[in-house]
Image: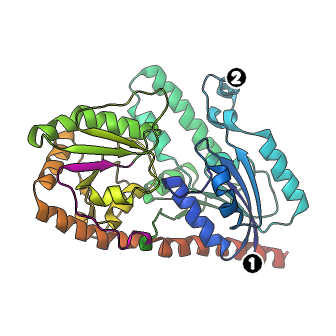
Amino acid sequence: MARILWVMGWFPLPPDKGVRIRLAQLLDTLAAHHQLTLIVLADPEAEIERYRGELAARCEDLHIFPRREFQPARWRAIRGFFSTIPRWLVDVELPEVHARVRQLWQERAFDLVIASQLPSALYVRNLNGVPKILDEVECGLFLDQVRTARNPLRRARRLLMWWKHARFLRALSRDFAAYTVVSDVEARILRRIAPEARVAVIPNGIDLARYQGIEATPEPDTLIFTGAPTYWANRDALSFFAEAIWPRIRQHRPTVRLWITGRLPEGIPLPHPPGWLYTGYLEDIRPWVVRAWAMVTPLRFGGGTRLKILEAMALGTPVISTPKGAEGLEFRDPGAVTIAGESHTFARAVVDLLEDPDRRARQGRIAREAVRDYDWARLGERYLQLVEQVLHERNRATTIA
């Protein structure tokens, strides 16, 4: 049993959104085999007091710090323009976390260090003598921002951000024994940035057992979008859907409704076309998803693997998605998810599904079968194998020395 120091960029409980689901699953997987010391950077939405005890029960030692949110106008962020490190990382770095990492490093002998998400790497990159894994590296989102920038000044700024991001990851590859990414798309980008890095693809997955036995009669003319509007890429998707797709659907199905789940951002206007309902945060979205006729995922930006799609599939709810929305997902049956790249084809796919109960039932059955490849029982074992391999290499090198 190894002793692992793990810096998490998010509070992992409850597992109610993509990043938390992955962290909670990794936590359960590793806690069953190793002793964990956790340093958690808690996001503003974290319910720390409610879940502190449950999180502490999964580890040997727990240290929680409030995560600093990036504020572009803050002096640290402005100063970051003159740093070779991405300025958002300069802005969010916390001296008190550095101090706690140094304290723990001096007090204990660790066998492995894990950093989840890029900001966490700031605190462990200079720890020498043990192997390190950087989990869930993301590149595609930053590259998309460059590709889609229209304004010359904005494009220049995003190119600078991308250059810093790529340079930082390339430099980190000398300090980390392995990177993990959630899709082959991310892996290809990362390997171009850092050809010498070991890159392991460990997709996001779901606990299929959690979705068994949840049944409901699907309600006609109901759609659902489960991406929280607090995330800018989800807000862009909603705006795109409202402007380019929703009117086409309503033209054919005037009674259609859209449910949007997740916390609402403060002070940011959201589209409110006829038929839209913002539910706010839901402790359990499964009853809503299983009641919906279909899920829509009209994303135009972002990276990673879409856990919202996997959840819908596990419940037998058909999914219509843009190519970007389903990026990183690969299924043996192409009918598992309906992909539509243009606004008119997206709207047509939704209408066809709303008008055909047999088609809906057929796609739901295909989806339930296809999603088995993303059962965390399989994917967690792959992550554990990577950890064991890195530990074995370290032990072998120590023995030879």
Q: Could you say which disc has been placed on residue 1 in the image? A: 1
Residue 400 at x, y = what percent? 82, 78
Question: In the orientation shown, which residue stands out farthest toward the right?
Answer: 107
In the image, 132: left or right of 223? right
Closer-to-camera residue (24/258): 258
**Considering only order in the chain, which callout, 2 or 1, is on the residue closer to the N terminus?**
1
Percent of width and height locating residue 66: 70, 42
**Three-letter amino acid code at disc 2?**
Trp
Query: Where 128 falls versus 279 (above or below)?
Result: below
Q: Which mark is residue 98?
A: none
Q: Which residue is mark 2?
A: 75
What is the magenta range?
210-226
Residue drawn 48% across the image and 70% down it = 376
**Is the C terminus in the top left, top right, bottom left or bottom right quadrant?**
bottom right
Report x, y in % for residue 80: 67, 28
- In the image, 162 versus 309, the foreground residue is 309
Is the residue marked by circle 2 packed among few (<14), some (14-19), or many (20+) residues within 10 Å?
Answer: few
State the SS at label 1: loop
In front of the other: 95 or 278: 278
| Quarter residue 12 falls in | bottom right
